[in-house]
Amino acid sequence: MVSTKHLVAGLCLLTLALAAEKAVYAHFMNQDIAQAQEIGIDGFALNCAPPRVDSYTPKQLANAYEAAADTGFKVFISVDFAYWGDNDSNDITSILRNYSTYTGQAYYNGGALASTFVRDYFDWNNVKNNMGGQKLTIIPMIQDPTFLSRQTTGIDGALSWYGWPTDGASWWLTLLTDFGESHYISGHEPHHSDDGSSEWTAEFPHDAWRSLMKPYIAAYKSGAASPTVSRDELVYWYRTTPKGIECTNDKIGKPRGVELFDDVVFASAMLTQPADLTVTSGSRSPVTVSVPADIHTLNFTMGVGKQQFSLSRSDAHLLGGFGAKDIQQSCETYNFNAYVGAFTA
């Protein structure tokens, strides 16, 4: 059961207003679990469609619960109502009842935890009444802000995929991780079946973001006002083309919304003591910023070419180097995914 402050893992943050306990969940399997546990994540939300849409749903749910049980991890089902509907109440009940007593199932307030993607008005009373005596704690995504004051559908809390954490007493936090939508934090796994996302993720790791998350997770779970930095580190990320580029062989065309981007390079300095950060983006002149201790994220105007980062303290070089990918002025297909890397002392 979730009886202490936990963090379960994606980069959209979901906050639940239920009680003072805290947990963090990410939207997995053994390698993914090990990576998650290393930074303080306690479990995964398993967003799933019905078998008529994804035939692998039953097998993958079973695999996830088995992996969780083997590693002391926790998981729970997130019903994706982009695909399920009101007529699926019996099937939803069957799945939730089946997994509610598994070792890897996450609990809250004595109930098997479950959530959703969208669907404010689904009748959860009907599901709860057919759980065979097993208590269910349901915290669906709520889109209509007026719904909570008049809801009678049997929910126990609410979450928002559009939410952002505040100083409230939320007991969990969710970090979404999805290769198809480019907000993954696990390493690339080339031997898995491919939904096409390898086109924009295969050589664009996001692993270093986990290093940035780890101290924030620890602070969240301990109730600290700010994260604690135990070693000097620099995490950087950037797109590998400017937003105005015209690719020569993309059959789909330029992604919608690219005009909203800024052409910048990001760097998060994680410092035990103050230091100077110097970033040289392509042919642009080097820019040096004095950065205080703790964690500070800065952005620098993007330049085409190599990306160089350097941290120094008292005129002595600490760490740094070149980003593994250059920013290019030409391309065949569009890729606005971020390349994420890191340097450590």
Image (spheres, helix red, strand yellow):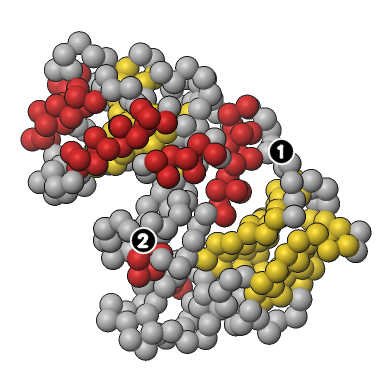
Q: Name the residue under label 1.
A: 228
The answer to whether 75 is drawn above or below residue 292 in the figure is above
Residue 332 location (% of width, % of height): 38, 84
The answer to whether 79 is drawn above or below residue 233 in the figure is above
Residue type at mark 2: give it.
Pro
Q: Mark 2 points at which residue?
A: 190
Q: At 63% across and 59% down in the image, what residue appears?
A: 342
Q: 178 left or right of 8?
A: left
Q: What secondary structure is marked by label 1?
A: loop
| Of 163 and 209, the residue lying toward us | 209
Q: 292 left or right of 78?
A: right
Q: At 47% across and 51% down in the image, what residue appears?
A: 185
The answer to whether 173 is drawn above or below residue 299 in the figure is above
- Image quarter hosting the C terminus: bottom right
Residue 196 location (% of width, % of height): 28, 65
Q: At 8% across and 35% down in the image, what residue appears?
A: 87
